[in-house]
Image (cartoon, grey):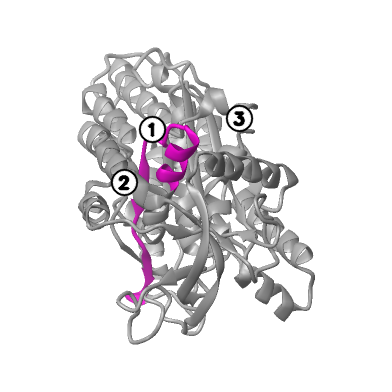
Amino acid sequence: MSKFYVTTPIYYVTDKPHIGHAYTNTVADVIARWHRFIGDDVFFLTGTDEHGEKIQKAADAAGKPAQEFVDGLAAEYKRVWERLGISYDHFIRTSDKSHEEIVQKFVNRVYANGDIYKGSYEGWYCVSDETFFTDLQLKEGRCPDCGKEVKWIKEESYFFRLSKYQDRLLKYYEDNPGFLSPRTRSDEIKNRVRGGLKDISITRSEVEWGIRFPIDRGHTIYVWVDALLNYITALGWPGGTFGKFWPADIHVVGKEINWFHTVIWPALLFSSGIAPPLKVFAHGWWTVEGRKMSKSVGNVVDPVAMADKYSVDALRYFLIKEMPLGEDGDFSEKGLVARLNGELASDLGNLFYRVLTLAERFNGEIKGAPELEKELELDSIVEAMGKPDTFTALNLIFKFVGSANKYVNDKRPWSQEGDELSNSLYNLLEACRIIALLLGPFMPEASGKMMEQLGVRGGSLKDCSFGKFQGKVKKMGHLFNKVE
């Protein structure tokens, strides 16, 4: 058994989770479930980022103390992940006392290594993104990321010597080509680092809602440093399960925070003597029917509403199938319905229903030669998930669904009898069993229903080959119902 450590970002708790958050966590969940399926010892981490000026302002606007405010939103995130079947092993909050203590211990180590010094910061600051920008980075005088107004800040600060690690970062990228993933993000990061790194401010003297800077308690630690450290504080660094699970095998993040995870984060780890993560995978963004998702436009998609209306598995399927991992995608309710009615209800659901109907009517022994097994591209599915490429893996599984449907149409088992019918049913039932196994990481509820109706237990990757069908079929209705 190998260890596998997968993380999502920790989400900033100023509002409820939207479809973008759901996508990141669904991708990470598929990866985590797959690695459990192949026999790895998995630790899957998600959580909430709860400090900073933006949180304090949101809490003030809500008329609540900051801790009470973040408690409510952290609970909402947990509720949403439970509804969407996100099988995390630990939910970390940056307001956790254990997190605070380890962050301060980490900062003390970096300071002892000579990589933190006192200075003053002057520049443009976006409260919404908790990020500093230069004049050149601003777009028409506004934040280049969210488009909101920025404010000029001049205050005493402590700095991290990021510039010291420029060459070491470039060497790490060269020695570990899979770290910057997908490859389309690689050149952008390398070119920015080659262009020169400046030391970065890591404290705020005028923000109260945060972790106290241990060197000077008149400062709080900049929210991004606090947040990045969650990946090791969740493991109890330097003790706990840190020695077992670190380095992280993959951080799944949105491309807007790729810089923090691929430059600042490994540099901080270098300074403290900790190995960097093995891979940072920066996925793309979702638009909604061609438009940027925005509260002001009113097109923010609630993932729970979609799951309640169309099922969790239909939503999970759409999110993985609609957008190749690493590229941008567009969400539309019509698109979700089209995939539900077509690929899920007509292709998968109809195949399963027809096979079970025929099997229930058959009174003989189900046996035969594995004719359909050659259509299963299992090695390619395993290879895709190892990258990870959830999009390609799911397409290959549904390619096998298509092969099984073609087998039904070619063999016409409803017109067969005796050994000929037994052979066709054997191939189709074993195909359905293997499809159910492989879909487990992607659509756990549908996979479980398929197993139950086939009368078989779950399994692992080693069970994805044709053997003797040992189930007892009991049809219980359609897997997916078509909708208007």
Depicted 130 relative to depicted 199: above or below: below
Q: Which residue sits furthest bottom? A: 140
First in residue order: circle 2 vs circle 1: 2
Instruction: For the residues labelled 1 and 3, say whether their Cβ atoms are less than 8 Å apart.
Output: no
The residue identified by callout 2 is 391
Frontmost of labels 1 and 3 is 3
Which picture quadrant has residue 390?
A: top left
**For residue 407: magenta?**
no
Looking at the rendered image, the quarter that the C terminus falls into is: bottom left
Instruction: For the residues labelled 2 and 1, say whether their Cβ atoms are less than 8 Å apart.
Output: no
Q: Of 15 and 395, which appears nearest the observer?
A: 15
CA separation, marks 1 and 3?
42 Å
The residue identified by callout 3 is 238
User: How many residues crowd mark 1 within 10 Å: few (<14), some (14–19), many (20+)?
Assistant: many
Give the residue at x 27% y 19%: 420
As drawn, the label of residue 380 is none
Where does the image place residue 172, in percent across and percent down from the top left? Answer: 29, 37
Amino acid type at mark 1: Ile
**For residue 274: magenta?**
yes
User: How many residues crowd mark 2 within 10 Å: few (<14), some (14–19), many (20+)?
Assistant: many
First in residue order: circle 3 vs circle 2: 3
Q: Of 315 and 268, which appears nearest the observer?
A: 268
Secondary structure beneath dot 3 equals loop
Whether residue 304 sits left or right of residue 447 in the image: it is right
Q: Of 74 and 207, which appears nearest the observer?
A: 207
Give the residue at x 35% y 28%: 431
Magenta residues, start to end: 265-291
The residue identified by callout 1 is 435
Which picture quadrant has residue 386?
A: top left
